[in-house]
Structures are given as structure tokens and as C-alpha cells.
Image (spheres, rainbow, N blue to C red):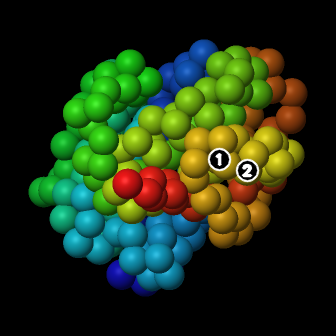
Amino acid sequence: MKRKELEWILGDLDSFKNPKVLLEQYATGPEIAATIMQTIDSEHDGIDGKAVADLGSGCGPLLISAALLGAQYCVGFEIDEDALATCSDNLKTAEADCCVDLVHCNVLNYLNSPRWKDSFDTVLINPPFGTKHNRGMDIRFLETGLQMASNAVYSLHKTSTRDYVLNRAKELNAKATVLAELRYDLPATYKHHKKQSVDIEVDFIKFVRNKVRE
């Protein structure tokens, strides 16, 4: 599937109806979602035929993209029931629900178990950036993803935190590669937002856990 076609499908999906500020819920635009997922698939062989997990899947743009790009099996893990309901509807709209499961859970509690080690080829994360609440939440999501992924984790992080994120990756015994610097358009979503929209520079990073010598 070409990127423009994927972007068109994602543009037809619903987003958060009542976004929750404590969960830092923001819509992931179709352009950035399509760009990320096409890169993972075409340049890193991370989607087609693979088992894919989306941690904090929200309304499902990354998860649905994985299904449309040929993932063998996809699971979206999400704490918010409203977002899961929207994601379920979006899967039907995109005709991408044949190989996808949705799990209602607290990602950091439910998946923090040895049983999930290496359970997916690829893990996708668009975590809370911790800009208003949830300080350090993006790294906690990354730690969980690194345990679950047998191949690689692909995640978004604020560019302003790049040095910190790369250093934390080393401490977590993972190799981190910044694949692209993107502009994430955050529309005015909550009452405290004064501007109509704000562009935030974000890094699109690939993490691979270093193999431990036996």
C-alpha cells in the first residue's frame, strides 16, 4: 500500500471524542502516522508478516496502519475504554479488524511481567510526553516495550529530550537510532490551550535491545 493511500484511509478515521488531559490524549495526524509506519515497513522490515504490539494504542492510527500494511497479528493495549471503543469502530471503517485484538489494561502494570518477554516482533509506542503530567512516562513505556520486542521498538519522543532518551537507552542496554526529526502538530485540545495549534519537534527513534552474551 502506498503512503498516500494509507494517509487517505487514516484521515477518514475518528479521533478522541472527549480527550482526557491526565492521559495526554492527542490525535496522531494521518500524515505523520502514515510516514512512520511506511518507514518501519519498507525500510526496516518491521510490519509485513510480523507480530506487532501498539502500547497505548488510543484510537488506533498506528495499529490500523500495521494491519493494513500486512502484519500477521496486531494487539493494541490501551487504558481508556472510550478510546478502545473508537478504535474498534475505526478498525471496521478501515476494514482492518481481521488480525487485530484490543486489550483494555494499564500498559505499565499488565505488561510488566516476564510472560510478555519477546512476545512481539515489533512494538510501536507514541507515549505520553510528560509535558503536563506523567513525568518520565515515555521512558517507562520504552522499558516495557524493550522487554516485549524480539526485534525492535519504534517510538516518538520530544526532540528537546533527545540526549536524555539516548542516554537512558544505553542504560537499558539498547541501541537507539534517530530515524527522523518530525513536526507533530498538536491542535488546541484542552481548555488551557491558548493557541489554535502548536508544532512540537519530535524524534522518531528505533530501539534494539542488545543481545546478552551467554
Q: Is residue 196 left or right of residue 206?
A: right
- Local packing at callout 1 (Cα closer than 10 Å; few below 14, some 14-19, many 20+) is many
Pinpoint residue 62: horizontal percent, then vertical percent: 43, 54
> What residue did someone put label 1 on?
169
Could you tell me the amino acid type at mark 1?
Ala
Q: Is residue 182 left or right of residue 20?
A: right
Name the residue located 39 percent from the left edge and 62 percent from the top edge: 151
Residue 78 lies in quadrant = top left
Name the residue located 30 percent from the left edge and 41 percent from the top edge: 117
Q: Is residue 8 visible from the viewing direction of this image?
A: no
Pinpoint residue 110: horizontal percent, then vertical percent: 32, 22
CB contact under 8 Å: marks 1 and 2: yes
Helix, strand or loop status at disc 1:
helix
Question: Which one is in front, 181 or 91?
Answer: 181
Pinpoint residue 63: horizontal percent, then vertical percent: 36, 52
Residue 116 lies in quadrant = top left
Q: Is residue 187 left or right of residue 28?
A: right
